[in-house]
Image (cartoon, rainbow, N blue to C red):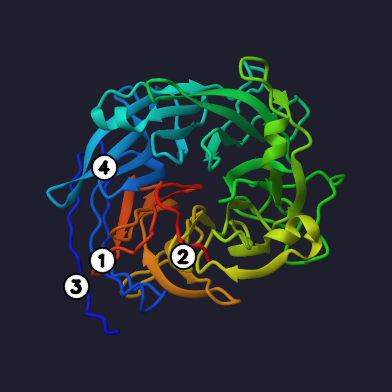
Amino acid sequence: MSFMPYKLKSTVISASAASLAALVMFSGACEAASSVPDFIPETVLGPGAAPNGVVAVDENAVFVAATATNSSGASVAEVLIFGRVHNSLQQTGTVVLKSGDEAEGMSITPDKTTLVVALENSGVALVNVGDALAGKAEPSIVDQSNGGTISDPGTFGTAVTPDGKYAFIANEFGKITPTSPPGNVGLIALSKQRDGRTTGTAVGFIPVVGSTIADVSISADGQRAYATTEAVNDKNTTLSGTSNAALVSTQCVEDNPQAPTSNGALNVIDVAKAIAGAATPGSTPNVIRSAVLTTIAAACSPVRVQETLDGSSVWLTARGSNELLQFDRAKLTADPDNALLQTVPSNGLAPVGLYLDPVRPNLMITNSDRWNASPTSTTTPPVSQMNLSVFDISGPRAKLVQTLQTGAFPRAIATTDQEKTVFVTNYDDDTVSVFTQQDEGSVAGGAGISPFGFFGAQPQRR
């Protein structure tokens, strides 16, 4: 079988001053011929609000959770909508979530009807996708303070179960009790109403080992949830994996060399047990203490985590170690002391975002260099310690295959299926980088993917 050469697809994104905009386009080799991408940066466009979460429903509907600043200097949590207009991506709408708050991570329900957006101070905003596209969205907010008893929840990340009935929430700072370490995993019951809109009710809070929860994700089979905690400073806490020097440290340093911390942890949660321990919607949320199956040391400041589509392993970014970690899923519960499969240099500094391609055996991560530890290099094209790095994970050892320049503090990653478009939010310079791989046709069975959940056709499993 022969393959025709592919041409660059050149597209210009236009955006208003209030929008996010930055575009980098690239062409790729044939999907069937190789799992290795070939990306070519094209352009970057102007400033907007500070973006974090991103969900690409399809080629005509891309949603970005962002924090703008109003004329009075106050923050405003928003969802910005981008669509294709005359073959270019343009901002087509804005959904104001809440003034005086910040928009963080975002996911989408499997039926593509509802965005689940983390609000730093308020909990979770539910936004109907159809209403948002029609310019008439009225977000509903689900409290994560347990009626005010959990101060400063710091809601940061969201993930929806494959059946669309529950959302797991990373509350970065919220203390279940005054003496608890900061952070918990919230559980929200989702309910579809007769008009097609989704409502939510807080039904539980799950305490985990360690402090400062940076992420939560759910496996494709819906059986496991994963939560990362950035540090475990309680010397009385027992972790798995501590016999492995690659996973433990008492000298984890990021922004303040004078204040080193201990390693963080990966908490493995049984989804069914969490749901069984939840309160009946309408009653006070339960504290669910029996759902965490195991907690394993996970190097310095583990932040993002995702399981592979075939359920064989779990990847995470260790921001403070400048590494990627891969664990064997089965051993995380059966033999956690020996669950680590490999550590991989991240090809930059302070890796944050993590994305597993739903079709190719590729892993993408964003090196944020958020502490500005390294200046941009003078190579051509310029590639700094702040980048989007692509790894081929088809073999037993992950292999770096591409390094792409991004904006400042690249954070979240999402894709669409048909044109292989990748979106990267750049938090510090208020842009979104867009990368495109164009081939002669779409991949059969391809599907879009939110940061922490699948939607559309089932991706090919590997």
Amino acid beneath label 2: Gln
Q: CA distance from mark 3 to mark 2?
A: 30 Å
Mark 2: secondary structure:
loop
**Numbered label attached to residue 7:** 3
Which residue is drawn at the image coordinates 71% and 65% (left, top)? 340
Q: CA distance from mark 1 to mark 3?
A: 12 Å
On residue 441, the disc is 1
> Do residues under tags 4 and 3 come within 8 Å of each other at their CB atoms?
no
The relative height of residue 217 versus residue 109 in the rendered view (above or below) is below
Judge by depth and name the residue closer to the eye, 324 or 219. Answer: 219
Q: Nearer the viewer, mark 1 or mark 4?
A: 1
Amino acid marked by disc 1: Gly
Query: Label 2 belongs to which residue?
Result: 385
Say which label, 4 or 3, has the lower sequence index: 3
Q: Real-space Cα distance between discs 2 and 4?
A: 29 Å
Q: Nearer the viewer, residue 279 or 354?
A: 279
Identified at 45% across, 54% down, the residue is 458
Q: Going from the N terminus, do you reach mark 1 or mark 4 first?
A: 4
Hey, what amino acid is under mark 4?
A: Phe
Above or below residue 26? Residue 200 is above
Q: Which SS class for mark 4?
A: strand
- In three-dimensional space, the C-alpha distance between marks 1 and 4, rounded to whole angstroms, equals 23 Å
Mark 2 vs mark 4: which is more N-terminal? 4
Check whether the beta carbons of the residues at disc 2 and disc 1 lie within 8 A of each other.
no
- The mark found on residue 35 in the picture is none
Q: Judge depth for marks 3 and 2 and give the one in front.
A: 3
Q: Which quadrant holds residue 430?
A: top left
